[in-house]
Amino acid sequence: MTERFDVRHIRNILPSGLLRKFIRPKHQWRRRGRAFSIFDTAAVAEKFISINGEGEKSGELAVFIRFCGCNLNCSYCDTAWANKKNLCTETLSARNILSYVNKTGIKNVTLTGGEPLLQQGIAEILNLLCYYSKRPLYIEIETNGSVDISGFSHYPVHFTMDYKLPSSGMELSMLTGNFMFLLPDDTVKFVIGTKNDMERALEVIYEFSLLKSVNIHFSPVFGKIEISEIVEFMKEHKLNDVKLSLQLHKFIWDKDTRGV
Ligand code: SF4
């Protein structure tokens, strides 16, 4: 795997003012004073604070921004409602989103969907959240593995990228070139519905040497496979560096509850 320059390391050693000066993309210098445009906005299905149910920050509080619309149609999609245009209740500007996040007082921010990277205003949203928040944020982007992430890899964010397995019906849409742009603290999530999915996940892990390169999560499709079956598979294949990731919110609340 090719290593790319990790802007997040610089973030830890430079004062924030310097960071803004040197890291902020050049085109942003021209934005001051410019009126809002469609490129600064996004369709938001819901925004709320809850427990991060999966991913590296599982169990911690997070503020979620769920964007509308997705280019895939996974067999097990549990947020298909958010992909319907008439249910996209709010159009928010990047500044609206920054202001909401600032007011929550929560450090972890999860941008999810749908597919967040398809929003027209996503670059401006990332720019404001990364460089203009009132406090340091841990920004996680949940992306579905079919959208090119290379244009977003310079932001100091954490990707949780799905690799869609056969039971999703969407594997042909996966862009494996994205693996090259992930860093060791990013995550590849395999959502598993069948034994065949696990076997395919293993093939992908070995083919792209993912074990030492990124965090790897196995996440069961809720109600479709026994969780113990996944654990047995992990034991059988000595998957020391793979983490079982459960959708905590579905154990705490009813699986169909929204806004949690
Ligand atoms: S990528 Fe996510 S939001 Fe889109 S259809 Fe699949 S599960 Fe649903």
Image: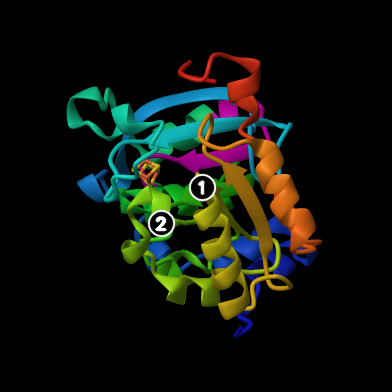
Range of the magenta residues?
Answer: 101-115
How far across and how far down the image is residue 65, in percent?
46, 34
Q: Residues within 10 Å of mark 1 (few under 14, many from 20)?
A: some
Residue positioned 64% across, 78% down in the render: 209
Residue positioned 40% across, 25% down in the render: 46
Task: Give 96 or 241, whichever is nearer the viewer.
Answer: 241
- The answer to whether residue 254 is above or below residue 15 is above
Residue indicated by mark 2: 166
- Residue 224: in magenta span: no
- The answer to whether residue 60 is above or below residue 150 is above
Numbered circle sitting on residue 130? none
Task: Give 114 or 8, whichever is nearer the viewer.
Answer: 114
Numbered circle sitting on residue 194? 1
The N terminus sits in image quarter = bottom right
Identify the image's colour scheme: rainbow, by chain, secondary structure or one colour.
rainbow
The C terminus sits in image quarter = top right
Q: Can residue 55 be seen here?
A: yes
Q: CA distance from mark 2 to mark 1?
A: 9 Å
Q: Secondary structure at mark 1?
A: loop
How far across and how far down the image is residue 217, in percent?
65, 52
- The answer to whether residue 82 is above or below residue 163 is above
Q: Secondary structure at mark 2?
A: helix
User: First in sequence: mark 2 or mark 1?
Assistant: 2
Task: Give 41 or 67, whichever is nearer the viewer.
Answer: 67
Residue positioned 65% across, 73% down in the render: 6
Q: Say if mark 2 contacts mark 1, CB within 8 Å.
A: yes
